[in-house]
């Protein structure tokens, strides 16, 4: 039975993350010829080609793309097992911020493995709006936060990119002859901005029927039939239905959710959690 060398997989994942053999070499503390030799060994062990040349760059083959997914899972499981067997559990609180539509859908799955490997760790989840969460991160009141805001000068990675859709109550009917009634968040709100910009570009008449300070209020307004709103697909449930081109509505751009790590002396637990999430999703800072 053949066995994979995990050190080769770790180098391979570093190349995928950095999109460069040279940057990967710095990350794994090896020379560029050394990691090139490692990749040749890995290809020989697997008997597949992992890279192909496109211009002056190397790109992943279909086999390489499949391997990247499995390699990340294998390495994450290996690191979790090592931590458990050697009793290197982390302790202390980790304060995490998340928007409401992510906190109850995406976040639990992300935290599950980390919490299982570190049962002595306590996590405090703060649910709020992205601008407020970023302010709390900058003030040192959060260790990590998920946010729709992009701050290039801060340590971060792209957590996920979600489609944004028009949502209405399941039994809601649009009045085609009237301005479009909207249920929106108050300022500042990126969902408010993308909705209004899309309607203005398309020349659609609209009115702000209901303005709410949080997601709970937006859901209540849509559920009550006061109008429609633009939110990421995480908000889609059986009580809401998705509207689109059939109803004369313009398309909406995807929404990026970023994960930020505080940059002023983050705790070991927060740093480890950030690194684990990065390894799970293949994210790059």
Image: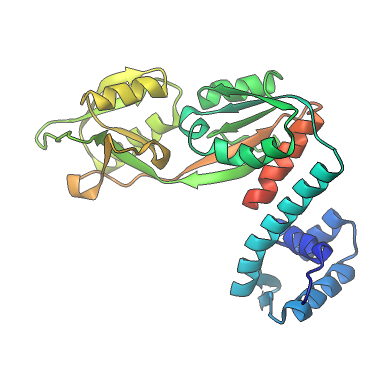
Q: Nearer the viewer, residue 1 or 212?
A: 1
- Please say whether residue 157 is visible from this viewpoint: yes
Q: Nearer the viewer, residue 170 or 28?
A: 170
- Measuring from the top left, give residue 276's x and y in whole percent: 71, 44
Q: Is residue 285 left or right of residue 177?
A: right
Tell me the quarter of the image containing the C terminus: top right
Tell me the quarter of the image containing the N terminus: bottom right
- Please say whether residue 284 is visible from this viewpoint: no
- Measuring from the top left, give residue 228's x and y in whole percent: 26, 32
Judging from the image, the colouring scheme is rainbow
- Measuring from the top left, give residue 119's x and y in whole percent: 72, 32
Q: Is residue 224 above or below residue 70?
A: above
Q: Is residue 226 left or right of residue 13?
A: left
Q: Nearer the viewer, residue 252 or 215?
A: 215
Name the image quarter holding residue 120.
top right
Q: Is residue 17 above or below residue 187?
A: below
- Measuring from the top left, give residue 245's x and y in whole percent: 23, 49
Q: Which residue shows up at 90% across the image and 56% down it? A: 29
Q: Is residue 79 above or below residue 47?
A: above
């Amino acid at each position: 039975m053949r066995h994979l060398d995990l050190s080769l997989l770790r180098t391979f994942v570093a190349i995928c993350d950095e999109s460069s053999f040279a940057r990967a070499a710095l990350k794994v503390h090896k020379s560029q010829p050394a990691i090139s030799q490692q990749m040749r060994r890995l290809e020989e062990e697997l008997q597949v080609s992992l890279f192909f040349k496109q211009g002056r760059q190397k790109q992943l083959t279909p086999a390489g793309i499949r391997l990247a997914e499995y390699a990340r899972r294998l390495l994450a499981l290996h690191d979790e097992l090592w931590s458990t067997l050697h009793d290197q559990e982390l302790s202390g609180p980790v304060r995490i911020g998340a928007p409401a539509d992510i906190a109850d859908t995406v976040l639990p799955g992300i935290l599950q493995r980390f919490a299982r490997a570190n049962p002595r760790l306590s996590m405090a989840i703060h649910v709020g709006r992205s601008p407020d969460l970023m302010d709390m991160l900058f003030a040192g009141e959060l260790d990590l936060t998920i946010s729709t805001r992009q701050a290039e000068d801060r340590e971060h990675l792209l957590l996920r990119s979600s489609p944004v859709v028009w949502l209405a109550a399941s039994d809601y009917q649009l009045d085609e002859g009237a301005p479009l009634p909207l249920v929106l968040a108050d300022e500042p709100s990126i969902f408010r901005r993308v909705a209004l910009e899309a309607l203005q570009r398309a020349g659609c008449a609209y009115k702000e029927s209901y303005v709410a300070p949080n997601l709970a209020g937006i859901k209540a307004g849509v559920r009550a039939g006061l109008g429609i709103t633009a939110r990421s697909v995480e908000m889609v449930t059986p009580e809401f239905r998705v509207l689109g081109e059939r109803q004369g509505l313009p398309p909406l751009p995807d929404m990026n959710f970023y994960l930020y790590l505080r940059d002023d002396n983050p705790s070991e637990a927060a740093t480890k959690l950030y690194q684990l999430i990065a390894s799970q999703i293949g994210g790059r800072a």
